[in-house]
Structure formats: C-alpha cells, structure tokens
Amino acid sequence: MANIKSQMKRIKTNEQNRQRNKAVKSAVKTAIRKFREAADAGEKDKAVELQQAASRALDKAASKGVIHKNQAANKKSALAQRANQL
C-alpha cells in the first residue's frame, strides 16, 4: 500500500473506474448476446429492438471511453448486418 496521500487517492479512483468499466463491458456483452439469441431463434421484431438497445449500449460505452470508438463501430456494423439477414 502506498504511503503518499495522492497515490492512495489514485488507487481508490482507479478501483472505482475499473469496477465501472467492468460493469459497462458486461452490460454491453449481455445486450449483444440477447440480440444474437433472438436472431438465432428467428424472432425478427425482437431482434431489431434488441439490436437498437445493443447499439445504444455500445455508443455509451465508447463515449465514456470504456471501449474504443472503432470497436463500437465494428460491433454495431456486425449487428446491423446480422439484423438485415433476418
């Protein structure tokens, strides 16, 4: 453990940011998984709705810096292609 006051504060904020990033990434993965499950089941209306929710989650994650904006764009593109195939 650090002895310097500012370093102790950095350790705390880094841990808070790590926990937030972990939660956001998990939520994004869950949204994508739900879309894929609906797409596999052939439920077009539900899949389109879930695709929009997943895209929104990806945009939010990218805007917060949790994932890179290009990664979000690539994932959104893949989701859109899959939705158009239904």
Image (cartoon, helix red, strand yellow):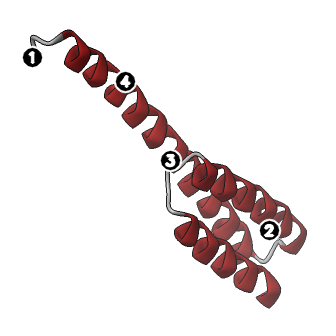
Q: Earlier in the sequence, mark 2 or mark 4?
A: 4
Q: CA distance from mark 2 to mark 1?
A: 48 Å
Q: Return the x and y of residue 64 as percentages of the image width and height.
A: 58, 45
Q: Secondary structure at mark 3?
A: helix
Residues tagged 2 and 4 counted as in contact (Cβ below 8 A): no
CA distance separating discs 2 and 3: 19 Å
Report the disc number at residue 47. Answer: 2
Which mark, by number, is residue 13?
A: 4
Give the Cα separation between the discs numbered 4 and 1: 14 Å
Disc 4 versus disc 3: distance between alpha carbons? 20 Å
Give percent across and percent down for residue 11. Answer: 26, 23
Q: Earlier in the sequence, mark 4 or mark 1?
A: 1
Q: At label 2, which amino acid type do we have?
A: Ala
Residue at 69 percent of width and 65 percent of height: 35
Tags 2 and 3 in contact by the CB under 8 Å rule? no
Q: Earlier in the sequence, mark 4 or mark 3?
A: 4
Could you tell me which quadrant the C terminus lies in? Answer: bottom right
Residue picked out by circle 3: 26
Q: Label 4: state its secondary structure.
A: helix
**At label 1, which amino acid type do we have?**
Met
Question: Cα distance, mark 2 to mark 4?
Answer: 37 Å
Q: Left of 41 or right of it: where is 74?
A: left
Q: Tell me the mark number nearer the camera, choosing from 4 and 3.
A: 4
Q: In front: 4, or 41?
A: 4
